[in-house]
Image (spheres, rainbow, N blue to C red):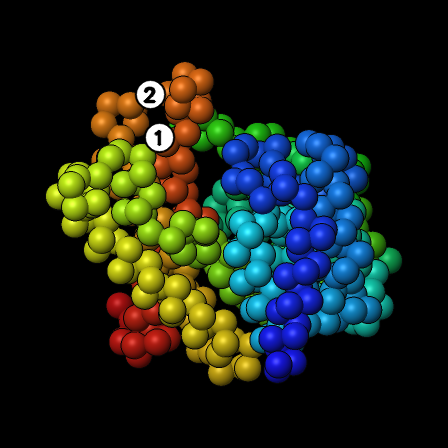
């Protein structure tokens, strides 16, 4: 038996012993997702036990080094771990912007002291983070941001606002882009970290057309941020921001793969019936779903290749833009098919039978996927210029 096979056996046995049955069921609502943080309330004991078991093993961040709360797994071992999690339909023990976005940036740009100080609480789910990037006048042109930090010697005084700040009303801390030099557009931004409970920080939820929204407006009025709470170099935060955006786009693109769904056609055949040949009964819908499944399988293969190249430093810097574009567009197609197959029932909005209109609300939410993290139009422009080497307009 190879070392990797032995590791797979070890992981399989550990999961069987430690993953509660309740944590192998599909996520039904927001309460089933463990976000962690100082104010987080566990939905049940199984959710708490699952997080604690994974924290003890380093499995909330399996590929992070052990001194920072991870399990220190190699890329191959991490892949095996994820395969075994997927095999038993195990829920993620911890969902976190700290894991998906801030953590990789800290590993790349943070000092050793910062890594130890910030990464361990992230891995344990003790601090919930939000992202302060977009502003009312700085969306696609993010670098035009105007939130300003005035230098006061041992601290900055920050004034301004952010928009589309996901879960800002529930977050403990924020990683935030703040202009600290008004004379230099790109080399005048600092990547700051500060507590959302700081005096002068307020949030206001933004209601979406779907009726559900994680988004907020976030306001900073004379917020004092210690000079120790920044990543990278002062006025060079754009370097950190660009690196983090790659991980954000990778995270958002994940919706295109469809999670544990092996085939959308197979899933809908169970729900809507089969013909005598055992196929989805509607031939037109069946053809559309087959075409979609082929594209998803191709996307998953592309994702595997991208991750392997990313971990070995061979990925094109704009590969994450490509993944983000394809993934979010696939996710929109998936929900279009869900709506098409549901008939009039898919338009229902409130009943218990339709789980409060889960289909139309989910369909409406996908429209935001192709805007957040960079619009599809911006992603195509980046792909054209940086991957295809096409001339700019």
Task: Decide: few, some or many residues near mark 2? Use Cα within 10 Å; few <14, some 14-19, many ≥20.
Answer: some
Horizontal relation, residue 165 to residue 331: left or right: right
Of residues 187 and 13, the one nearer the viewer is 13
Q: Secondary structure at mark 2?
A: loop
Choose top left, top right, bottom left or bottom right for residue 120.
bottom right
Locate residue 332, reporting x and y percent.
33, 46
Q: Residue at x 46, y 56 (%)?
A: 254
Choose top left, top right, bottom left or bottom right for residue 374.
bottom left
Horizontal relation, residue 232 to residue 146: left or right: right
Q: Which mark is residue 348?
A: 2
Q: Residue at x 26, y 34 (%)?
A: 272
Locate residue 290, reporting x and y percent.
22, 53
Q: Residue at x 21, y 55 (%)?
A: 291
Horizontal relation, residue 117 to residue 354: left or right: right
Q: Secondary structure at mark 1?
A: helix
Horizontal relation, residue 288 to residue 301: left or right: left
Q: What residue is disc 1 on?
A: 360
Of residues 50 and 204, the one nearer the viewer is 50
- Residues marked 1 and 2 touching at CB (< 8 Å): yes
Of residues 184 and 287, the one nearer the viewer is 287
């Amino acid at each position: 038996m190879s070392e990797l096979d032995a590791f797979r056996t070890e992981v399989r046995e550990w999961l069987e012993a430690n993953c509660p049955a309740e944590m192998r069921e599909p996520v039904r609502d927001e309460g089933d997702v463990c976000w962690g943080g100082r104010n987080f309330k566990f939905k049940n004991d199984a959710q708490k036990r699952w997080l604690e078991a994974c924290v003890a093993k380093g499995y909330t961040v399996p590929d992070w080094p052990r001194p920072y709360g991870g399990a220190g797994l190699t890329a191959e071992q991490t892949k095996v771990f994820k395969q075994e999690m997927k095999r038993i339909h195990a829920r993620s023990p911890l969902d976190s912007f700290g894991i998906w976005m801030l953590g990789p940036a800290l590993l790349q740009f943070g000092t050793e002291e910062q890594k130890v100080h910030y990464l361990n609480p992230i891995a344990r789910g003790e601090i919930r983070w939000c992202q302060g990037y977009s502003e009312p006048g700085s969306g696609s042109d993010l670098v035009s941001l105007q939130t300003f930090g005035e230098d006061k010697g041992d601290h900055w005084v920050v004034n301004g606002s952010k928009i589309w700040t996901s879960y800002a009303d529930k977050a403990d801390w924020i990683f935030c882009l703040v202009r600290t030099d008004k004379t230099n557009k790109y080399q005048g931004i600092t990547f700051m970290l500060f507590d959302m409970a700081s005096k002068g920080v307020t949030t206001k939820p933004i209601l979406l057309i779907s009726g559900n929204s994680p988004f907020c407006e976030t306001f900073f009025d004379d917020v004092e941020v210690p000079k120790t709470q920044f990543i990278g170099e002062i006025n060079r935060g754009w370097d950190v921001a660009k690196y983090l955006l790659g991980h954000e786009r990778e995270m958002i693109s994940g919706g295109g793969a469809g999670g544990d769904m092996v085939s959308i056609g197979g899933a809908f055949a169970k729900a809507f019936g089969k013909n005598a040949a055992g196929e989805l009964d509607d031939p037109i819908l069946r053809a559309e779903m087959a075409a979609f499944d082929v594209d998803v399988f191709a996307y998953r293969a592309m994702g595997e290749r991208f991750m392997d190249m990313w971990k070995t430093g061979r990925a094109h810097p704009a590969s994450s833009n490509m993944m983000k574009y394809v993934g979010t567009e696939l996710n929109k197609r998936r929900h279009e098919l869900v709506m098409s197959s549901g008939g009039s029932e898919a338009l229902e909005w409130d009943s218990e039978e339709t789980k409060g209109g889960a289909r139309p609300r989910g369909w409406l939410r996908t429209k935001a996927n192709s805007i957040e993290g960079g619009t599809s139009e911006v992603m195509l422009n980046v792909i054209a210029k940086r991957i295809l080497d096409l001339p700019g307009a």
